[in-house]
Image (cartoon, rainbow, N blue to C red):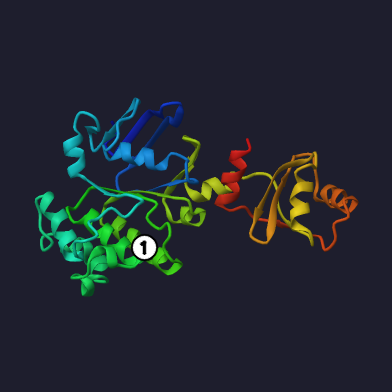
């Protein structure tokens, strides 16, 4: 194993009866990287994360973390890993302080010993340290869960959709916290269904139906989108997308906010689609060439 590779996964498969959750998943993550798994619900992110933190066994394949085999050395791996599951899983009847003390104790440390790791996060909820965890707001629960995952000074932090259901301000704050933790040398693996969060990672893996479609930096993934991309709208948007999907030269068409993002086959031009839509009696037609974002790249990969 290369010394700078903290995590290497090779050929990971996992099925639940007839459902294939993961198919031939392979990746490597250098020490100190903020790595994102980007994909919709049901893509296999949670299953993969549970395997990474040794809560679930893969059917096939190998994972090496910190030079340790995740199956054989699972006890050592757990001591080096902090895990924040997608669903809030702390003790809701215990107070904020009691939850944090509990997690520190089971890892053989104290809040005082590693307070410097959680200071920026925990200081925001410390005024409420006597409040039961179940009575916290979504953003405060998120900060408590992250504090509990960090209190034993892990080398790897695994966060499963940590910002799902959290308001936009708390989402922004959370990613700022991850940036600060990365500066401390902690390797961070995070999953999210929010494509806009992909740009905040060093590298991302786009995952769908248990398969990794592409792994690269967000900038490289966006630059790999070679076809012209158009934002198009008309007065009848429902009819518009249905008509575009019948146009022979359409490569992909999907709704994006108030527009439809359209990619044509290499031989087609914007004038061709304008003429086609005019014949379909569309009025108020607007079409502009735009630059792709990470979501456009994801959708493009899905239709290949």
Residue 267: quarter of image: top right
User: In which quadrant will I find the C terminus?
Assistant: top right
Q: Residue at x 90, y 50 (%)?
A: 279
Q: Nearer the viewer, residue 274 or 241?
A: 241
Q: Nearer the viewer, residue 218 or 108?
A: 108
115 to the left or right of 9: left
Residue 176 lies, in percent from the top left, at 36, 64
Q: Residue at x 74, y 50 (%)?
A: 241
Residue 21 lies, in percent from the top left, at 43, 33
Q: Residue at x 40, y 32 (%)?
A: 26
107 to the left or right of 60: left
In this view of the protein, can residue 287 be seen by the observer? no
Relative to residue 139, is residue 76 depicted above or below? above
SS under mark 1: helix
User: In which quadrant will I find the N terminus?
Assistant: top left
In this view of the protein, can residue 181 be seen by the observer? yes
Q: Nearer the viewer, residue 78 or 99?
A: 99
Residue 3 lies, in percent from the top left, at 26, 36
Which residue was labeled with disc 1? 174
Q: Residue at x 27, y 63 (%)?
A: 134
Residue 189 lies, in percent from the top left, at 35, 47
């Amino acid at each position: 194993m290369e010394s700078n590779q903290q995590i290497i996964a090779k050929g990971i498969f996992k099925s639940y009866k007839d459902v294939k959750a993961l198919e031939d998943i392979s990746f490597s993550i250098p020490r100190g990287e903020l790595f994102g798994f980007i994909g919709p619900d049901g893509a296999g992110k949670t299953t993969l994360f549970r395997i990474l933190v040794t809560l679930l066994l893969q059917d096939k394949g190998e994972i090496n973390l910190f030079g340790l085999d995740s199956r054989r050395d699972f006890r050592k791996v757990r001591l080096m890993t902090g895990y924040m599951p997608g669903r809030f899983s702390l003790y809701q009847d215990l107070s904020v302080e009691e939850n944090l003390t509990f997690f520190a104790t089971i890892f053989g440390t104290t809040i005082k010993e590693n307070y410097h790791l959680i200071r920026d996060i925990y200081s925001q909820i410390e005024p409420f340290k006597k409040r039961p965890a179940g009575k916290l707001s979504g953003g405060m629960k998120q900060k408590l869960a992250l504090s509990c995952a960090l209190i034993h000074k892990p080398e790897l932090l695994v966060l499963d959709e940590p910002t799902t259901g959290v308001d936009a301000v708390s989402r922004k704050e959370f990613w700022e916290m991850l940036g600060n933790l990365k500066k401390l040398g902690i390797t961070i693996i995070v999953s999210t269904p929010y494509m806009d969060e992909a740009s905040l990672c060093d590298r991302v893996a786009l995952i769908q139906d248990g398969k990794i479609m592409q792994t690269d930096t967000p900038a490289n993934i966006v630059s790999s989108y070679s076809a012209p991309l158009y934002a198009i709208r008309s007065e009848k948007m429902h009819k518009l997308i249905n008509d575009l999907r019948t146009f022979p030269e359409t490569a992909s068409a999907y709704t994006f906010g108030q527009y439809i993002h359209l990619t044509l086959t290499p031989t087609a031009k914007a004038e061709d689609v304008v003429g086609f839509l005019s014949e379909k009696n569309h009025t108020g037609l607007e079409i502009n060439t735009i630059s792709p974002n990470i979501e456009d790249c994801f959708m493009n990969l899905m239709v290949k």
